[in-house]
Amino acid sequence: MNATRKSMQSPPPGKDILPAGLALDDVHHAYGSRPVIEALGFAVAPGEVVCLLGPSGCGKTTTLRLAAGLETLQRGTIAIASELVSTAATTLAPEHRRVGLMFQDFALFPHLNLLDNVGFGLRHLPQIARRAQAMALLERVGLGALASTYPHALSGGEQQRVALVRALAPKPVVMLLDEPFSGLDARLRDQVRDDTLALLKEQGVATLLVTHDAEEALLMADRIALMDKGRLVQLGTPEELYRRPVNAFSAGFFGDLSRFQGRAAGSAVSTPLGLIPCPGLADGTAVEVCVRPEGIKLMAENGPVRGRIAAVRFLGASALLVLDLPGGERVRARCRASSGLAPDREVSFGLDLDCAFVFPSR
């Protein structure tokens, strides 16, 4: 690895590289003969949070390690603040990339107190300035009174906050976070996510956050980069990915679906839930229909479809119903919880077409 500190060449003319932040272009990577990332490209703007989302083994963490300089790039380019930091020929060392790193285990130094942990990346400053800046960051996350405490005495949420401000202390251009909330219990996770997001936005840093949790991506991201088998499937805002998925994989990653097979005929496909439009598909095209549970709406007795409740799963303010249709199909519906919902009851319902998607079968 070439760890030279001198500035690498500028991005080639015409490339869509941001004036600041992180940009990946045509990135490929393999471990031996096994491809892990193929033709990956996207950018993260200053102050933006992009969640890299996908199933285990899809290449998310490898992408993060390439951006950090922990893996040597095999093909493509990576730029930070308009400076190429990785090409197939040259790699800038991680410590010279102006990136902050935060991993699942937080990796705090057990022999240093919180003040010294946060100040670790500020050793270029005089001691007084280093300690003052570290203390200001600890106070920003409500831990100033614990500055002399050691990491083992902290809760998981407190350790997460210390790890975050330690990574932010040197004022990085890019923050890279790998599943940073996975070790926290569910009740604590939401508050820590909110606090982390507020601090990242306050600092204006370009953030790439790796997660396999679709709900976390919807909550945290300005944009989501959804990956599958090393490739970028869809890139857009949380609303775009949820409401306008590009394929069945994208639709299914954000929640349970009822699925039907069919064929296009007259710009629609016939399903047990009724006709669903599929404009642009030629007659006879084999299709897969995906319907979100909230798209199946319980109605009064005049609903177009009838079914029988097979099971009710109480979820608090809402309930998930398993419905058996007359033709033997089974679908799931999410609705407002009601004491009148019970197994074996017959119900009538309709379909919200905004929650139904039609894709050509693979």
Image (spheres, grey):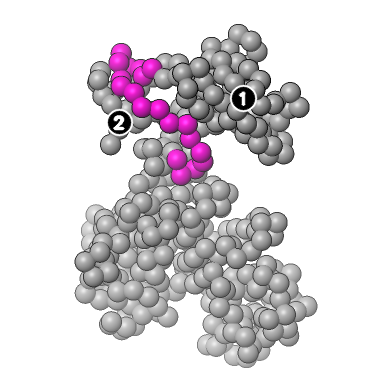
Image marks 2 and 1: residues in contact by CB distance under 8 Å: no
Residue 269, located in which quarter of the rendered image? Answer: top left
Is residue 157 located in the magenta-colored stretch of the structure? no
What residue is pinned by disc 2? 360
Q: Is residue 139 visible?
A: no
Compare marks 2 and 1 and give the one earlier in the sequence: 1
Q: Which of these two is toward me, 131 or 265?
A: 265
Q: Which residues are magenta?
A: 252-270
The residue sitting at 68% across, 34% down in the picture is: 318
Numbered tag placed on residue 309 in the rendering: 1
Asked if 120 appears above or below 327 in the picture, the reply is below
Q: Horizontal and vertical percent for residue 230?
A: 32, 56
Numbered tag placed on residue 256 in the rendering: none
Residue 25, located in which quarter of the rendered image? Answer: bottom left
- Residue type at mark 2: give it: Pro
The residue sitting at 41% across, 65% down in the picture is: 61
Q: Horizontal and vertical percent for residue 233?
A: 35, 47
Q: Horizontal and vertical percent for residue 115?
A: 67, 83
The residue sitting at 55% across, 31% down in the picture is: 332
